[in-house]
Image (cartoon, rainbow, N blue to C red):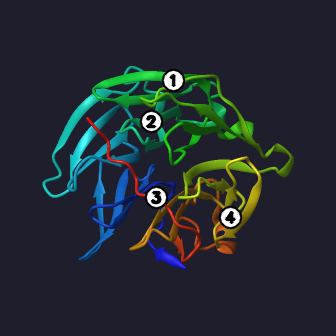
Amino acid sequence: MIYDSRPCELGEGALWHPERRQLFWFDILGKKLHTVGRDGPQSWTFVEMVSAAGWVTRDHLLIAGERDLFLFELESEEIETLTELEAGNPGTRSNDGRADRQGGFWIGTMGKRGGDDPGLGSIYRWYRGELRKLFGGLTIPNSICFSPDGRTGYFADTVTQRINRVPLDADGWPAGEPETFVNLADQRVYPDGATIDAAGNLWSAQWGAGRVACYAPDGTFVRAVSFDAPHTSCPAFGGPDLTMLFVTTAQEGLDAAALSLVPLSGQTFAAANVAKGIPEPQVIL
């Protein structure tokens, strides 16, 4: 079903806030943050592209923008910069990001021309006041999510068509080299955002495939949920019992003729009773 009909040019960063019990998501190219609260749909517009968030308090989000990570107070709309994020490189922007189980926040950067800017992307981690670069030489970092016990991190470089996993230490830092978790090259599938359910299964939104696919902890394909928009981009579990699967989508890359065939593109979808999620961790500043 359609959860919200506001079309996003590039929907991303779906986040279910466990204290507010509401979904937040971004239109990166539209420079907007969206939600649906008690009073209905609400949006905030920023001066730069914004892409991903973690929750810090009931009223504060940590948001990744083009050039920095900043605190955003939802009621007053006050902004406080925490750290610069490739501020000296105007050719890059933030992309996919998510909080880890230890309270850190992982965020990817990429070239503004996407696949035409190979190797400009990186993944960073913000943890207790420190921003550290974890992986470089990526093109479109995506699929950032974490196992329920916090000992495994996942990420993808979308153009490689592989989702990777990496062991994490007790503080959430990588404790080994990444290895392939799922290779989708033979299926012509491109992994975008991802999330983990309570059983440790990874749910991957797959750009161009119009679906969110589920993979068991050993990488075995389990099932897929289809949506009426080809560019599914970022999933999140939410709802009162965390069994609603939300997914953002995008209009990016679709011309008028294509959009006439898939007119729901860019809208945000929901599917009930798919699996049970786990609450998003609080970011510890």
Q: Which of marks 2 and 4 is in front?
A: 2
In the image, is 162 to the left or to the right of 227?
Answer: right
Task: Look at the image and tell me in which quarter the C terminus lies.
Answer: top left
Measure how far apart labels 2 and 3 are at the Cα level.
18 Å
In the image, is 221 to the left or to the right of 272?
Answer: right
Q: Which residue is drawn at 44% across and 41% down?
A: 100
In the image, is 41 to the left or to the right of 15?
Answer: left
Kind of element beneath mark 4: loop
> Contact, CB < 8 Å: mark 1 with mark 4?
no
Measure how far apart labels 2 and 4 are at the Cα level.
26 Å
Residue on which the image places disc 2:
106
Kind of element beneath mark 1: strand
Give the number of the disc on residue 278: 3
Which is more N-terminal, label 3 or label 4? 4
> Contact, CB < 8 Å: mark 1 with mark 2?
yes
Residue 162 drawn at (x, y percent): 72, 40
Q: Indicate the amino acid at tag 4.
A: Gly
The residue furthest right is 186
Which is more N-terminal, label 4 or label 2? 2
Measure how far apart labels 4 and 3 are at the Cα level.
24 Å
Residue on which the image places disc 4:
210
Residue 176 drawn at (x, y percent): 61, 22
Q: In this view, does 2 lie above or below 130?
A: below
Q: Indicate the amino acid at tag 1.
A: Leu
Which is more N-terminal, label 1 or label 3? 1
Residue on which the image places disc 1:
134
> Contact, CB < 8 Å: mark 2 with mark 4?
no
Q: Nearer the viewer, mark 2 or mark 3?
A: 3
In the foreground, 248 or 251: 248
Task: Look at the image and tell me in which quarter the N terminus lies.
Answer: bottom right
Q: Indicate the amino acid at tag 2.
A: Trp
